Image (cartoon, rainbow, N blue to C red):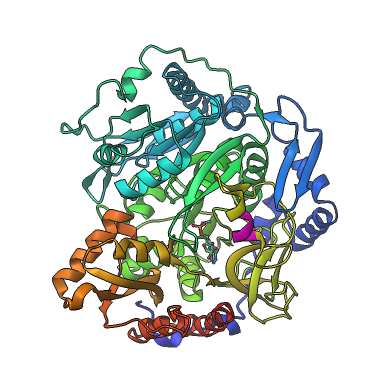
Amino acid sequence: MSHPASDITSVLKEGRVFSPSSEFSQNAHIKSFAEYEEIYNRAANDPEGFWSEIAKELEWFSPWEKVLDWQLPFAKWFVGGKLNISHNCLDRHLKTWRKNKAAIIWEGEPGESRILTYQALHREVCRFANALKAHGIEKGDRVAIYMPMIPELAIAMLACARIGATHSVVFGGFSANALKDRINDAQAKAVITADGGYRRGQELPLKPAVDEALEDCPTIKQVFVYRRTNNQFITMKEGRDHWWHDVVANVSDHCEAEQLDSEHPLFILYTSGTTGKPKGILHTTGGYSVSTYITTKWVFDLKEEDTYWCTADIGWVTGHSYIVYGPLSNGATSLMYEGAPNWPYPDRFWNLIDKYQVNIFYTAPTAIRAFIKWGEEWPKRHSLASLRLLGTVGEPINPEAWMWYHKLIGKEKCPIVDTWWQTETGAIMITPLPGATPTVPGSATRPFPGIIMDVVTKKGESVPDNVGGYLVIKKPWPSMLRTIYGDDERYKQQYWSEIPGCYFAGDGARRDERGYFWIMGRVDDVLNVSGHRLSTMEIESALVSHPAVAEAAAVGRPDPLKGEAVAVFVTLEGGRKGSEDLKQELREHVAKEIGALAKPDDIRFTDALPKTRSGKIMRRLLREIAAGSETIGDTTTLEDISILAKLREDEE
Ligand code: PRX
């Protein structure tokens, strides 16, 4: 990183406190810390009352009979209620002046832009929903979506939601193999894709990966292909593959939204767990709608006239909740950008902020660290004066990156919301409310109203202030995952059995004397690489599927840019010797098995892996070796590591 070592401040000693300006607070939805605490306490005393008040801000076809049915660990929210999230994101606004408001402002990487008003988006969603129906897609079917960041990705999701088909979006950076596994696990009936998209000036083809995946996906009957890059080499399989523009050509632009049960499955999103097999996190309609709606409104202090931009890819939960469902259910204007932050130059994001006069900007710490590396001259070329609020998500933000963001992007006037949550939680759980909560660099501060969190020991006892422990959620919340698709037992096992009676998030944390939470990172075998979740087991199984590899162990090591980097230790078959060529081959092999995001950063060949007497790989040792090989420029990370190492020791 470019900052001098003397700038480094440990998070354990972080004392800088930043309060919102009185002007910001006066105009905010939640105006003071006292107001936050009042709402928080009210919600804690009567969570069902709190959530049902919020739920009433959305439109329901029929009201619920019971707010919560909780049979630990299975929750049903707004039981008996009927609604449709596509209706709440679209139709609800058409009755108002928002009809002609921009819903999605999109910019492609090559530079073209499109603006879809709520009415235009509604029309496109209805047309595509009718096309899906005409091709036999019905309520309850699963549909895989594998697309670049174009408006049709949001249209496809909203069209599925409209007819009650459950979507499973697979990030476009995943390989054919990863797509195949996800399609088969969900038994999807159709795939929605594009010929390709643009990334760093290159065409990134997608349809060929779909073709490859579908060689082994017996449940897929239909494939819909949007023409984005005009790729002339795409092949279309007769009877199975259809061009998007053909299927919407002659359909009605009227499609009634299905009246869905509150617990109707809205989407499955696969994420990495502690085993090799990704978990299909299942979210349902009612609770997810309510949580994403209110968190978007309060956390981003959303105003009617704001232009809001979340830079995530819709292939991750952040994009689901905070590009599509949260902003649109609020009737907001959401900016969507297709490509890389440094294309054609490292100021593309700052350029977009000025061009579209973005007011709220939500990105990942790993991106901020990349901007720091690219140099402050890039943001300094732009005014950025439209910004009034900044956010981060996906990994702990080191105080130096926070300060850079605060000074160079926020011009010392924009509150920063550091939001902690997960694919499983569906919506933001720990976060400042920008007009109310004084922020401290590196802390996600306090839980959102209605969310009861704690830091506990393995036995579930609260730990004292400033002592590291396991981060848990103690009460059910509306947007909680309902299960792991098709595997209730694994759901129970994974989230609800480690710590008695609580949802265990997999993270280590501590809470300070202010009641602020400091997230320290995963305590399980999940890595967080550039804000992307990867399981060490997944990488290990990819490696051992290569004929040269006998055994493999993957661990994370601190990386100043990516947060964590993937370090692997490999033993080879039959005394083979490792070489640079083989390293390259193994990297490519992992990219083929999972996706380029999982490519190991360091590969070490070894004669044997250190094991306990019972044969368990001693990961802690490997982590230390992996970390030791790098000079770590940030004591913050070191301190976290020692606490994490201790927690992990308890695990091993
Ligand atoms: O370790 C935490 C980290 O990201 C994990 C969840 O990853 P995923 O399901 O991919 O969702 C990412 C976007 C919501 C968490 O278990 N994480 C997420 N946000 C933060 C964070 N760690 C620290 N601070 C955050 N704000």
The front one of 388 and 181 is 181
Residue 380 in view? no
Residue 255, percent from left and from top: 53, 17
Residue 598, percent from left and from top: 34, 61
In the displayed structure image, the side of residue 494 where residue 346 appears, left or right: left
Image quadrant in which the N terminus is located: bottom left
Residue 131, percent from left and from top: 42, 19
Stretch of the chain drawn in magenta: 491-495
In the displayed structure image, the side of residue 144 where residue 444 appears, left or right: right
Task: Name the residue at 68% across, 51% down.
Answer: 28
Residue 449 against residue 90 in the figure, above or below: below
- State the image quarter where residue 536 is shown: bottom left
- State the image quarter where residue 500 is shown: bottom right
The front one of 414 and 150 is 150
- State the image quarter where residue 288 is shown: top right
Residue 50, percent from left and from top: 79, 47
Residue 439 in view? yes
Task: Name the residue at 24% across, 60% down.
Answer: 589
Q: Main secondary structure of the magenta part?
A: helix
Image quadrant in which the C terminus is located: bottom right
Task: Name the residue at 78% across, 58% down.
Answer: 40
The front one of 285 and 428 is 285
Task: Name the residue at 28% across, 37% down.
Answer: 215
Q: How many marks?
A: 0
Residue 290 against residue 587 in the figure, above or below: above
The front one of 327 and 250 is 250
In the displayed structure image, the side of residue 116 where residue 54 appears, left or right: right
